[in-house]
Image (spheres, grey):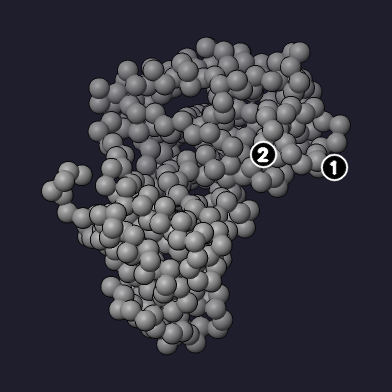
Amino acid sequence: MGPSAPLPRIVVIGTGDTKSDELRFMASVIEEAGGLPLMVDVSILDDPPYAPDYSKHDIAKAAGTSIEAILASGDENSAMTLMARGAASLARDLHDTGQMDGVIMLGGTMGTDLALDVAAALPLGIPKFVVSTIAYSHLIPPERIAPDLMMVLWAGGLYGLNGICRSVLSQACGAVVGAAKHGTKPDSKRPLIGMTSLGSSCLKYMKHLKPELEKRGYDLAVFHATGMGGRAFEAIAAQNGFVAVFDLCIQEVSNHHYGTVVTSGPDRLENAGRAGIPQIVAPGAIDMVDLQAWQDLPAIFAGRPYHAHNRLIGSVTSAPDGRREIARLVGRKLATAKAKVAFLLPIEGLQEWDRPGEPLHDPEGLDAFLDEIRKALPATVTLKEVDAHINASSFSQKALEIFDTWVAQGIIPEGRP
């Protein structure tokens, strides 16, 4: 954005009846930073002591109702859910009609609940900031976090302005204006492929596949499958944002099955198929269950092989019966796909630490998974067994062969060098 460009329009969303001082302070910072604040009031009861650009009545109308009907809906939860629907609809309309360049939202639990819906309604590339008293909290389920959402902890600011609150709000407002001015939008010149993996100490196929796919005229986005990465992958797939996916690390399916916090939500391995995106899938690291390394090991995993990757995350192997359960779950998820699915099965191992001599080596568990997945995959999925470890070059080559065949058949659009 050059010096003569129009001011970036920043939508500011909050409850003006209870947080007017904070919201007006935010508007002043946005103006000082070279932005144009557009105030959106999502109050339910009282009116703010200023005239918002979009009132609670506008929000109710965008939700297809009235503020009176919202007030009569039952309780504050149902009322704010309706206001969230209206705010999300309004924000999407402002984006689609070219009237916004970024959004910043303020709230406690109620405001954050609404803000997550607004962020999810906006496409990738629009700056989205939430200043929240529950930023980074496990109260927020991963499936509700937009792929490029930025959160700032609203420290010391639940009620009224103070020095700490001003510092937090001013930094957040400066950040959203800066992002709107200088952020680079996603480049759509080359078809985008999504891939899942873990770090290269565990899974290595992306080292071979990335340069090969780029030579063919594609952009490749590799998602770190440690909960939030898989969530971002699923959110973009749900918006039909990929021309194809190499979903080669589906460990988050196991994590969610066992109830760990390293989850991408219940719809992991479902959105690409639901959107009709061709999928090349492999069970990378599905034998592992990730946990916080700083907590005691749950009793269900007592005695199982364990690997502490760092001080944040560790991995334990699931038992043979558990791996059979996971294999059946994978089969059920892939059965819903509306496009081509190929399942690559590397029969010598699923991640680097399951090799002989490594801490997660478990041939009995591997055999149980291999046996069950062969039975669990639906007839609509093409099974390709690879007589190699997942980190062998022959595995990556087989994945690339399937991809090239699908391009030649017109199942995947050709790249643009």
Which corner quadrant of the image does residue 56 belong to? bottom left
Task: Give me the disc on residue 21.
Answer: none
Residue drawn 57% across and 28% down?
198
For badge 2, the amino acid type reads Ser
Mark positioned earlier in the residue sequence (2 or 1): 2
Callout 1: SS: helix
Residue 184 against residue 61 in the figure, above or below: above
Residue 285 appears in the picture as rendered = yes
Q: Nearer the viewer, mark 2 or mark 1?
A: 1
Q: Nearer the viewer, residue 30 or 269?
A: 30
Where does label 1 land, which residue? Answer: 299
Q: Position of residue 46 (x, y in %)?
A: 43, 85
Residue drawn 31% across and 59% down?
30
Q: Nearer the viewer, residue 261 or 279?
A: 261
Residue drawn 42% across and 52% down?
171
Mark 1, Cα crowd under 10 Å, few <14 / some 14-19 / many 20+, is few
Q: Position of residue 249 (x, y in %)?
A: 57, 31
Mark 2, Cα crowd under 10 Å, few <14 / some 14-19 / many 20+, is many
Q: Position of residue 213 (x, y in %)?
A: 37, 21
For badge 1, the amino acid type reads Ala
Residue 87 appears in the picture as rendered = no
In the picture, measured across the screen, residue 60 lies left or right of residue 36, that is right
Residue 156 against residue 335 in the figure, above or below: below
Residue drawn 42% across and 62% down?
105
Check contact, mark 2 vs mark 1: CB within 8 A: no
Q: Quadrant of the N terminus?
A: top left
Where does label 2 land, which residue? Answer: 254
